[in-house]
Image: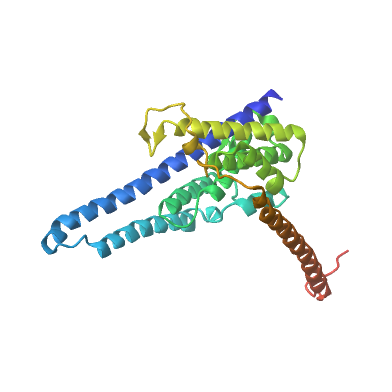
Amino acid sequence: EWDRWLLMGLIGTAVGMLGFLIHQIIDSLTKLKWELVENYLQVSKKIICLSNGQDGNIPMTWLCVLGAGLAMVVLSSGSVLFFCPAGSPSGLPEIIGYLNGTSIQHLFNIKTFLGTFISCVLAVASGLFCGPEGPMIHLGALLGCGLSQLQSDTLGIHLPIFTRFRNSADKRSFITAGAGAGIASVFRAPIGGLLFTLEEMSSFWDIRLAWQIFFCCLMATFTTDLLSSSLHGFVYRGHFGFFEAERRILFWVKNLLDMNVLAFIPTILLGVLGGLLGALFVSLNIKINTLRMQFFNSIPKLFLRKTS
């Protein structure tokens, strides 16, 4: 099993490097956008505002921000519209569908990887209300598939190593690990990546696979944190290997609040209310699906014909 653990480590490292690269490109594009806006604002102050005493050419600056964001959105949309339509969705429903036995064309294609990567960084850097979390799941699954199979019909590559993993069961396991590593890299949460694959994606599970996926998620988080410790927007900061908690942990809480025992009363009430609403939702969902199936089964299927 050493080769399986080696592949899990390689997939985690590759996904971690990819997560680092995505964040660096997004930071660089965002910084470039605001530098252009700031430079334009400074020029407008010198040329226009010194004569009339105003604070700046705000409308033109706003148009500059809008234009920069719109240009990235157009490029992001064009990359998936004309270059790679398979990379247009987030990829999560498609990955879940594949792991449950649905074959989807071009889901793990190298072209899909490039289109998703380009579209993701441009869309996030444009300022849209979106993030790289969903695409990172798809990109991680793509890396898990590619590194475990080491073959590509598009590129004409069929390497004669790790051939024993070229079966559907092992392929699904490595795809699941890659998707979990994507979550672990983008959120800096290896346990979160493991739990995500357990709860949302995997159609088969055992303890051995859990440890292997957890190792993959650990490698992804470690690689992203290690590389990000020294670079920010591809600018060297001189702190390689120094993991700052406030920069590495998302949603970091600096100051703790003093608590009173009475504060647990509304907390308990909220928990009970959430549980009741959750139970009601599940119950209604089951009943609605039952009625839906009864309704569709009652419709005569004229297009179906019994064959011998």
Can residue 198 be seen by looking at this rendering? yes
Residue at the spot x=76%, y=40% of the render? 205
Figure quadrant of residue 13: top right
Identify the image's colour scheme: rainbow, by chain, secondary structure or one colour.
Answer: rainbow
Q: Nearer the viewer, residue 171 or 6?
A: 6
| Left/right of residue 60 with respect to residue 254 in the rendered view | left
The answer to whether residue 304 is above or below residue 9 is below
Residue at the spot x=61%, y=29% of the render? 9
Residue at the spot x=62%, y=33% of the render? 216
Residue at the spot x=22%, y=62% of the render? 57
The picture places residue 91, in percent across and down from the top left corner, at: 59, 51
The picture places residue 45, in percent across and down from the top left corner, at: 18, 57
The picture places residue 43, in percent across and down from the top left corner, at: 18, 54
The answer to whether residue 60 is above or below residue 94 is below
Residue occupying the far right of the picture: 308
Figure quadrant of residue 287: bottom right
